[in-house]
Amino acid sequence: MKAYSLMILPLLASGLIACQGSGNNTNLELIQDMMESPAVDPQEYDDFFEDKAGGARVPPEHTAPVGFKPYRAGFDPNLAKADRNPLAGDMSDEVLLVGQKYFNTNCMVCHGQKAAGNGTVAEKMPNKPPSLLSDKVRSWADGQIYQVITMGQGTMGPYASHIPQKYRWQVVNYIRHLQRTEK
């Protein structure tokens, strides 16, 4: 019993001493670059891969990010009309604030603060962005507005990578809110 006590005592003492660092010493790295690995830029040239692409790796075929749901309507307007807004009529502050945030970040620069098609860059564009307050857009189904946000239309590119799926319907509701307050 006494022999074990004599072995445990130095181990305990060294453990306590090791925990009392001065705070200015760096950690001992046994394997280099494990704590601070070098970052790879998406456009960076990399000799390691056959195609020389750095961080811009193409995902394996038939894979999808966790939680991703493919947009089934594509460019088909009939499928888009049938796409039902799960937040239809929900004009709660929470929904409208999220919709407003994404609208102001992504849409306002072209469509304007009130969606009238008079954004700050609209005057410099050869094809002016349409007013989202027009009778044409008002008559669209929510799914059609969602489709334009997701897939783009005319000179407007897709915003699927800018506005997450779960927030696009809130942007649609915010546009509907703007249409109601302008009339």
Image: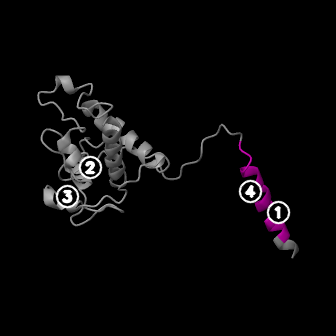
Q: Kindly indicate the quadrant of the structure image that contains residue 74.
A: bottom left
Please state the horizontal and vertical placement of residue 23, each as a whole percent of the image. 68, 39
Q: What residue did someone put label 4 on?
A: 15
Of marks 3 and 4, which one's residue comes earlier in the chain?
4
Give SS at disc 4: helix
* Residue that carries the numbered disc 3 in the rendered image: 81
CA separation, marks 4 and 1? 10 Å
Q: Residue furthest top?
A: 123
Q: Quadrant of residue 130?
A: top left
Residue type for callout 3? Lys
Give the residue pinned by disc 1. 9
Q: Residues within 10 Å of mark 1 (few under 14, many from 20)?
A: few
Q: Amino acid at mark 2?
A: Ala
Colouring scheme, one of rainbow, by chain, secondary structure, one colour: one colour
* Cα–Cα gap, marks 2 and 3: 18 Å
Residue nearest the viewer, comparing 108 with 180: 180
Q: Residue at x 29, y 30 (%)?
A: 112
| Residue 44 among those drawn in magenta | no
